[in-house]
Structures are given as C-alpha cells and as structure tokens.
C-alpha cells in the first residue's frame, strides 16, 4: 500500500472512531487532524503501518517534533525496538498489530 492511500484510510477510520466526519487531533482533541505523526518513525513498513500513526494538527505535530522528551513521556514517540508486536499503543488505545 502506498503512503497516500494508507494516510487517507487512516483519517477516514479515525474520524469514524471519533464519531465524526472529520478526524480530530489525537493530542489536543480540538483542531482537525491534518498530519500523520509516525510514532515509531517512517523507516520501511512503518511508513504505511497505521498502527503507529497518530492523527495530529500541525501545531501539535510541531510540538511533538520540537519537544522530543515531552513527546516520549506522553507516548507520542517510541524507539523502533521498544515495544513487542502486540503491546498496546497507549496514546491511541490501538494495538501495534492494528
């Protein structure tokens, strides 16, 4: 699956989970989610694996990128080898296998 397709499907699914036609930022919960933050990076299959996507607004995405210690403490970033395959992604309540 290409990234554009994975990203589009993710936003549709996120909006549906939130009971809305528009996906909201998973960090501030106020603004529209316009960006995908890759919780475990964008290397290899992680680029298109929605289990490690976080739907965020531009403002929150900038905060995640510019405050890495805060982001890690909130569960918004993880090292690529930190969690086992089935451990839940705490910030979004999904498991890493989807």
Image (cartoon, rainbow, N blue to C red):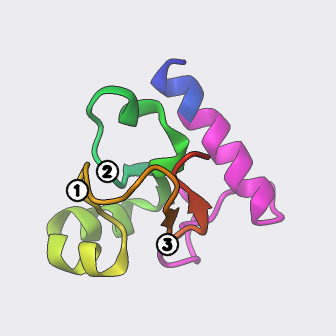
- Residue 22 — which label? none
Residue 7 placement: quadrant: top right
Which secondary structure class fits the magenta region best? Answer: loop
For label 2, the SS is loop
Per the image, the residue denoted by label 1 is 79
Per the model, the C-alpha gap separating discs 2 and 1 is 6 Å
Packing grade of label 1 (10 A; few <14, some 14-19, many >=20) is few
Q: Point out residue 34 in the picture as x, y percentages from the top left corner.
A: 50, 51
- Disc 2 vs disc 1: Cβ atoms closer than 8 Å? yes
Give residue 95's position: percent from left, percent from top.
Answer: 57, 57
Assess whether residue 48 is covered by the magenta stretch: no
Q: Judge left or right: residue 59 versus residue 52.
A: left
Q: Residue at x 52, y 55 (%)?
A: 86
Residue 91, disc: 3
Residue that lies at the very extreme toward the top in this rendered image: 1
- Disc 1 secondary structure class: loop
Which quarter of the picture shows residue 69?
bottom left
Residue 67 at least partly seen: no
**Which segment is the magenta one?**
7-34
Q: Please state if 32 lies on the left or on the right of 91 as rendered.
A: right
Query: Which one is earlier in the sequence, the residue at label 2 or at label 1?
Result: 2
Q: Position of residue 24 (x, y in %)?
A: 62, 65
> Does the magenta segment cover residue 15?
yes
> How many numbered marks have been drawn onto this rendered protein structure?
3
> Element at badge 3?
loop
Residue at label 2? Answer: 40
Q: Position of residue 6 (x, y in %)?
A: 56, 31
Badge 2 crowding class, 10 Å Cα cut-off, few under 14, some 14 to 19, many 20 or more, is many
């Amino acid at each position: 699956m290409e990234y554009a397709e994975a990203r589009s499907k993710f936003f549709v699914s996120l909006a549906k989970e939130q009971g809305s036609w528009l996906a909201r930022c998973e960090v501030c919960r106020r603004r529209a989610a316009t960006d995908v933050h890759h919780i475990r990076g964008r290397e290899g299959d992680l680029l298109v694996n929605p289990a490690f996507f976080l739907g965020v607004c531009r403002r929150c995405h900038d905060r995640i990128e510019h405050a890495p210690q805060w982001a890690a403490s909130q569960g918004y970033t993880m090292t690529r080898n930190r969690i086992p395959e089935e451990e839940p992604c705490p910030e979004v309540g999904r498991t890493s296998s989807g």
